[in-house]
Image (spheres, rainbow, N blue to C red):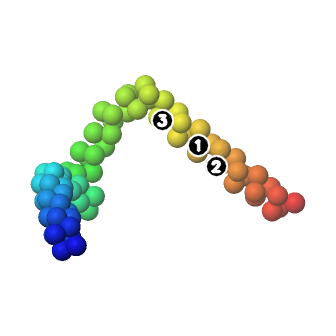
């Protein structure tokens, strides 16, 4: 039993080390994303807007924008119907 436990412990340690190595590069990305989300620099909001505008044609091409517009319309219609029922 002890040998099996030792082997599974070693396997778990190896998998953990491998995962840690794979995720190490993402640490810097996450730190930068955190800084952007907190708007630590004055130029972050305009940079985000320019990036979004560059992505807009691609999002439209794949129908993503229309999908979310449709979802928003359905939600607005639901709210309007609920308001009408409430007023009756």
**Residue placed most toward the observer, 55 or 40:** 55
Q: Tag 3, which secondary structure?
A: helix
User: Between disc 2 and disc 3, whose residue precedes?
Assistant: 3
Residue drawn where x is 48% and y is 35% of the image: 65
User: Between disc 3 and disc 1, whose residue precedes?
Assistant: 3
Instruction: Tell me which corner region of the image, top left, top right, bottom left or bottom right, holds residue 40.
Output: bottom left
What mark, if any, has residue 71 been given in the picture? Answer: 1
Q: For mark 3, what is the residue?
A: 65
* Residue 41 appears in the rendering: no
Instruction: Tell me which corner region of the image, top left, top right, bottom left or bottom right, holds residue 58.
Output: top left
**Residue placed most toward the observer, 74 or 4:** 4
Percent position (x, y) of residue 78?
70, 51
Residue drawn where x is 23% and y is 60% of the image: 34
Kindly indicate whether the residue at mark 1 contacts the one at mark 2 (C-beta within 8 angstroms): yes
Quarter of the rendering occupied by the C terminus: bottom right
Q: CA distance from mark 2 to mark 1?
A: 6 Å
Give the side of residue 62 with respect to residue 22, left or right: right
Q: Tag 1, which secondary structure?
A: helix
Q: For mark 2, what is the residue?
A: 75
Residue drawn where x is 28% and y is 58% of the image: 37
């Amino acid at each position: 039993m002890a040998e099996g436990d030792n082997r599974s412990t070693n396997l778990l340690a190896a998998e953990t080390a491998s995962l840690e190595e794979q995720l190490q590069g993402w640490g810097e990305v996450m730190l930068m994303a955190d800084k952007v989300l907190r708007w630590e620099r004055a130029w972050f909001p305009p940079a985000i807007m320019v990036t979004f505008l560059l992505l807009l044609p691609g999002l439209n091409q794949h129908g993503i924008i229309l999908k979310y517009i449709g979802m928003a319309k359905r939600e607005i219609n639901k709210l309007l119907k609920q308001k009408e029922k409430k007023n009756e």
